[in-house]
Each structure stands twice: as C-alpha cells, then as structure tokens.
Image (cartoon, rainbow, N blue to C red):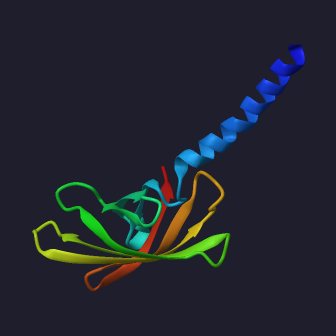
Amino acid sequence: MRGFARVLAVAAMLAVPATMSAQFGHPLKGQWSGGYGKNQENRLLLNFDWDGKELSGVINPGPTAITIKKTDIDYSNASAWKVKIQGEGKDATGKPVTVAIDGTLENIGAYYKIFRGTWTQGTVKSEFAVTRN
C-alpha cells in the first residue's frame, strides 16, 4: 500500500506542471502592457485570446478600443516568432483609425514574454514594447 501511495504522489506531481502549461494555451494569449512612441510614452494594453485556430482580441480596451482584425504569425524560428497584427477602431475624436503592429515575440518559453517592434497608427510610425502581465 505504501508503494502505491508513493507512485500516486509522484504521478500527481508530474501532472501538475502539464496542466499548468496547458492553461496558458498560445504564447500570445493573455494581457500585455507597455507603450509605444518616443521612450514608450503612450500607454499600450493588448488583450489577446486564442480559440485554438486564430488569435483575436483588442488593443487598449475602452471607448477607443481597436479590434484586432487579422494576425499573421511566422513560427519558423522557435525562439523568436515574427508577428503581424492589423486592427481597426476609432481615435479620441471618433475618427476611424487603423493600427498595424509588426514585431517579434521573444522569450517564448518563459512566462514573462517580450513583444516588441514597429507600431503604425494611421501615418505615424514608432517603436513599441510590451511584456506579458
């Protein structure tokens, strides 16, 4: 009986990490925060969701939220994925605005991942950097 309890305990300990990693799903899924612009002075919050097939979500949730319309992910480099995201929303004055994010997802195997690259809003282009919360 004692041997069976040990085997059961070891099996339970091995199962916990497997279920923990399964809960996160896609490495981009979750909330990301950081900024864009010179010295990242503009606040940036990304909420990504993964349905098993594609990434969806919003950029800067709230009255001027930008809905993600399209994502392209290049998985060819296992340590740093190339990610392109296009979104549409409205600016502070209510005018339509298009956002394009072209970046690299780094630290894919770690919980605190980094996503950085180029942020384009309308005709304005700047650098962005966010980390997973």
Q: Is residue 91 visible?
A: yes
Name the residue at 68% across, 40% down: 17
- Left or right: residue 41 compared with residue 131: left
Q: Is residue 118 visible?
A: no
Spot the residue most to the left.
94
Residue 128: image location, x then y, percent: 44, 70
103 relative to 112, above or below: below
Quarter holding the N terminus is top right
Residue 20: image location, x then y, percent: 61, 41
Name the residue at 42% across, 56% down: 33
Residue 5 versus residue 47: which sits nearer the camera?
5
Q: Quadrant of the rendered structure where residue 72 is?
A: bottom left
Residue 35: image location, x then y, percent: 40, 63
- Left or right: residue 53 compared with residue 113: left
Name the residue at 78% across, 25% down: 8
How many numbered marks have been drawn onto this rendered protein structure? 0
15 relative to 9, above or below: below
- Left or right: residue 91 compared with residue 68: left
Name the residue at 70% across, 37% down: 15
Spot the residue most to the right.
3
Residue 96: image location, x then y, percent: 15, 76
Q: Quadrant of the rendered structure where residue 57 is?
A: bottom left
Residue 124 versus residue 100: which sits nearer the camera?
100
Spot the residue most to the bottom.
123
